[in-house]
Structure formats: structure tokens, C-alpha cells
Image: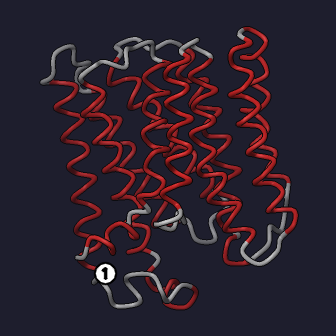
Amino acid sequence: MRLSVALRLGRVSNLPTVWTNALAGTALAGSSLFDMRLVAVLVALSLFYVGGMFLNDACDADIDAIERPERPIPSGEVGRSSVYFWAYGMMAGSVLLLFVAGMLLPGGTGAMPAICGIVLTALIVLYNAKHKNNPLSPLIMGLCRVMVYLTAGIAVSTSPGPSLFVGAVLLAAYLIGLTYVAKQENLGRVENMWPLLFLAAPVIFGLTVVAHDTNALPFWCLFAGWIVVGLYFIRRRGPGDIPRAVVSLIAGIALLDAVMIMSTGNLLWAALAVAGFGLTLLLQKFVAGT
């Protein structure tokens, strides 16, 4: 498989949002950025994401042959069985890395990170197998990102506080709204607007963060403003606007992470999350984010 094909299959332009998720989960769990376990967790979660994207193309190959014939599998650039092999191989490797982080690295938190990895694998497989014409698929996708937060937090802390779980719920709400938009991408329009209300939950929470720490205001403004940009594309509904809204809101995940990190008062980590947002936008210019 050529590298260019692998990059497209894995939607690697969106990987920085996985990294910022891991930083947010770690911060919300009260751990340090300089924890060596975080390296293993970052690699594992990256493989989960790329493997999940590979699996998405393999499962959707038949419909892509009709709607997106330029995708790697229907265009004949790579075989479907090969993509399945790499998808499951990456996810198995991710679980193994989490086992190493929990059981073998100094300060490990036991078997729970690997168990979280198994749950995440199950959710990824369920989403990709059942997401077409499934009204619950946005919820399943939201749960996938929830497990990214929880996996990172549980890998670095044996007793993460409620902040980690609050952050996970807010991330799920954002992903439900985002995934609903993404499901309409090929229609060129969004048929119902009410699921977009899920995007409001983390915005409202961000106001409570600003109320306690005014240093969070620039991060909240950037996050809320970026959602408005995505909603503008959805409202305008011109040619290509729905895909543009999707990739914009995907990049916005990193800004949500910045707000969640600021709820812990960690300005440096929040700035790193904003850098992840910028990197996502840059990479999306070279590798399609959807």
C-alpha cells in the first residue's frame, strides 16, 4: 500500500484532534504532561483513530463505489481485504500498547487502560458496521471520543475525578452534533437542525469556565466563534458547504479540548490544544478530513 493511499484512508489530517483529546483527558484526570505513559497512550489512540478510519472505508466500500468512486478501495488503489487487515491490526496493536502502559510502565494503573481500549475497539467496530441509516450512529461516534478521554485519563490516574467524566459528556454532545452533520454530507444539505443544539452544551459550559478564570475567555471566544463559522456553512448550504462545515467542526474538537483544559487552569496545555487546531486546519489542505 502506498503511503499516500494510507494517509487518505486514515484521514490523518484529523489526528491532532486525537492528540488534543488525550491532553485534555490527561489534564482533567489531574496528571502531568511529562508523564511517560502519555507517550504510549498518544501512539495507541492515534492507531485507534487511523485503524477506525481504515475500517470505515472497508465497510463502506460498496456504497463508496456509487457515491465516492474516487476513494482508494473503489478506485482500485488498494484491496478491501488488505484494508481490513491493517484496520484490525492497528486496533489490536493499540490495545497491546495500553496493556504495556498500564501493566509494565512505571506508575501504571493496571489493566483498566487495556479494558478501555477493548471497549473503544468494540464501539469503533459497531459504528462502522451499523452507521448507515442508523439514527443512533451519532451517539455511537460520540461514545468513541468519550472513550478517548476516558482511556487517556484512566491510563494516567487510578482515581480520576468527576471533571474527566463531565468533559467526556460534553465532548460526546459536540460529536453528536458534528456526526449528524457529517451524515448529511453527500446530500449537500442538513434536513433537520435540532441535533445541532448538542453543540451548544460545551459552549454553555465554557461560559462557566470563563466565569471562574478570565484567562479562559480567549479560548472560549475562539471555540464559540469557530462553531458559528461551521453553522454559517450549514445555513448557507452552497456547493461544498456541508463538507466544509464538517471539516471545520472536526478541527473545532481541539478548541473544545482547549476550553476543557482551561477548566483545570493549565494555560500551557490549552495553548498546545489551540496549536493542534491550527495543525489540523493545515493538514486538511493536503489530506481530506472526511
- Tell me the crowding category of disc 1: few under 14, some 14 to 19, or many 20 or more residues within 10 angstroms, Cα based: some
- Colour approach in the figure: secondary structure
Amino acid type, callout 1: Arg
**Apparent side of residue 36 relative to residue 229 in the rendered image (left or right):** left
Q: Is residue 1 left or right of residue 180?
A: left
- Disc count in the image? 1
Q: Residue 279, relative to residue 257: is it above or below?
A: below
The residue most toward the top is: 212
Q: Indicate left or right for 209 with 124 as reference.
A: right
Decide: is 161 above or below 207: above
Residue 229: x %, y % from top left: 78, 52
Where residue 290 sits in the image (x, y, percent)? 54, 66
**Point 53% across, 43% down: residue:** 143
Question: Considering only vertical position in the picture, is 124 above or below 70?
Answer: above
The one of 211 and 57 positioned closer to us in this rendering: 211
- Residue 188, compared with residue 106, is above or below; it is below
Position of the N terminus, as image quadrant, is bottom left
Rendered location of residue 128, percent (x, y): 46, 64
Residue 115 vs residue 7, the one in the foreground:
7
Residue appearing at x 58%, y 11% in the figure: 265
Give residue 113's position: percent from left, percent from top. 30, 30
Q: Name which quarter of the figure residue 255 lies in.
A: top right
Tell me where residue 108 sits by quadrant. top left
Residue at x 57%, y 32% (from the top left corner):
257
Q: Write down the residue under mark 1.
A: 80
For numbered disc 1, what is the local secondary structure? helix
